[in-house]
Amino acid sequence: MDMKVKQKKLNKKEKYTVQTRDLGWEPTYQSKDKIFPYVEYEGIKIHDWDKWEDPFRLSMDSYWKYQAEKERKYYAILDSFAQTNGHLNLTSARYLSAIKIFQQAITPGEYAAHKGFARAGREFPGAGTQVACQMQSIDEIRHAQTQVHGVSNYNKYYNGFHDFTQQRDRIWYTSLARSFFDDATSAGPFEFMIAIGFSFEYVLTNLLFVPFMSGAAYNGDIASVTFGFSAQSDEARHMTLGLECIKFMLEQDPDNLPIVQGWIDKWFWRGIRLLSLVGSMMDYMLPKKVMSWKEAWQIYGVENGGALFNDLARYGIRPPKGWEDADKAMDHVSHQLMLGLHQWNFGTSFHTDVPTEEEMDWLSAKYPDTFDKYYRPRWNFMKEQAEKGKPFKNMGLPKLCQVCQSPGLYTEPDDPTMLCHRETVFENEKYQFCSDHCMDIFNNEPEKYVQAYLPMNQLFQAPLYGDLNAWMDWVSLRDGVDNGDYELSEDKKNFDKWRNDVKSNSVD
Ligand code: FE
Ligand code: ZN
């Protein structure tokens, strides 16, 4: 007779080992070089993959349990927000411009990150690394999905949300984010980890999710706050993974240091350029403001980033090369970019406005050295022009930086009255840049960046041939509906009316 064997219950650590390390095996009929062809071509030397420690040691079953719990909470809140017409509790529908940009630029980035981590998980040989990448890949697709679901409620009532997937590729301001992710997902697996795990997660999502999500809370956007917090608890895991990956590379071989430093320099700058979009969202698009972009940078960039680089100093890592220029630019970027977005707002799938007097006073208090001197006069000019019935629109096309793809609107680090413009020739073609740092990134890998897809240039090519209306169709922009000034928009008209309907009994 068989004796019943009582299954020994595994403790957490044993369970983790069984579900990760035990899944790896030694190949017998193919060489490792053939199975993992990309792991060496970046020049990173790894001697022992087993030294990779995933910081969270999360087993798959507890991972699903945590995530399912978050999903349940998120969708319960989302449902009640939709059922109670939560959108009418927004401070103003003007606020939604920030969410439109978020959906058009950042949400597709989450999706790209999901694809990138699925690939990185396949390309890295270590089982611990593979499992960590797989979990992050699932996290990222969840972020994309929850964000799309979060805004689907706004899409029923407001314009500009209808075609974010097309706009991600075709419209101009989204290419700041799109080109960042194109660059990251076409890099080797180690560089990808620095791009997303370090630059996007560590440096940027702190700035994006924490202060920006409090902005959402201040403005009554419970849908976004809830997805923000639901994502943020994953981000903590992602940041640790990114940092672990950096330390792993640095500990494995001293030859890895200059390569890693080069990537940190590059991806810090790419990240900071992308973030200027969030700067304009925070300083200008939130009707009720939380903190200025410069203050957010001070806390999440200078203080947290500074602590990170102190920690990495023992490996020989120094702060990124563009750090000082980024710091100087904090007094300017959100204003410069917003002035750009406003004067080209016939080509944006969101609304913009000249800030109110009250907002300008806030901006001048937050930017005492620069706002009144350089930016208030320009806003005042735009306001006067609009009042005369001749709103200032810039029908000229800006040059786009070949690397970060921002329009040429940023100024020299030490002269805010001089546009910053750099140029290089590669194989008889001229290329333009927004800064020394973007030019350096190009010069380091020109063969890669000559292939960059610049959306603005499409306007002059077949089938558009410079026709602005054809371009609007091509980017799914409904002229007079999705674009232009908020004051004149259908979004404003509807929002004011619906809000009024809540409080009155008027019939119309
Ligand atoms: Fe994410
Ligand atoms: Zn650039």
Image (cartoon, helix red, strand yellow):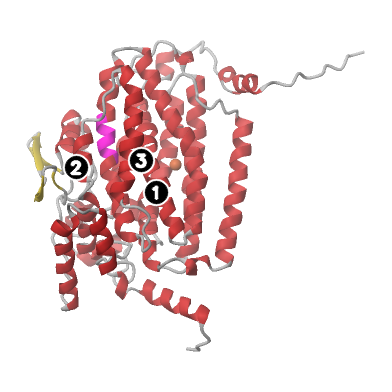
Q: Secondary structure at mark 3?
A: helix
Residue 164: % across, % down: 38, 56
Amino acid at the residue labelled 3: Tyr
Q: Which label is found at residue 328?
A: 2
Q: Is mark 3 within 8 Å of ligand 1?
A: no
Residue nearer the viewer, 22 or 61: 61
Is there any visible trace of residue 411 in the rendered image?
yes
Vertical placement of residue 140 versus 126, above or below: below
Q: How many marks?
A: 3
Q: Is residue 76 above or below residue 33?
A: below
Residue shown at the point (18%, 62%) measured from the top left: 376
- The picture places residue 161, in percent across and down from the top left corner, at 40, 61
Closer to the N terminus: mark 1 or mark 2? 1
Give the percent coordinates (x, y) of residue 505: 53, 86
Q: Earlier in the sequence, mark 3 or mark 2?
A: 3
Instruction: Name the N-terminal-most of marks 3 and 1.
Output: 1
> Tags 1 and 2 in contact by the CB under 8 Å rule?
no
Report how far apart the C-alphas of labels 1 and 2 lie in the structure: 20 Å
In the image, residue 321 lies in the stretch drawn in magenta:
no
Q: Residues within 10 Å of mark 2 (few under 14, many from 20)?
A: few
Mark drawn on residue 300 = 3
Q: Nearer the viewer, residue 238 or 46?
A: 238
Q: Is 47 or 40 nearer to us in this picture?
A: 47
Which region shows up in magenta? 265-271
Residues marked 3 and 1 touching at CB (< 8 Å): yes
Mark 1: secondary structure: helix
Residue indicated by mark 1: 211
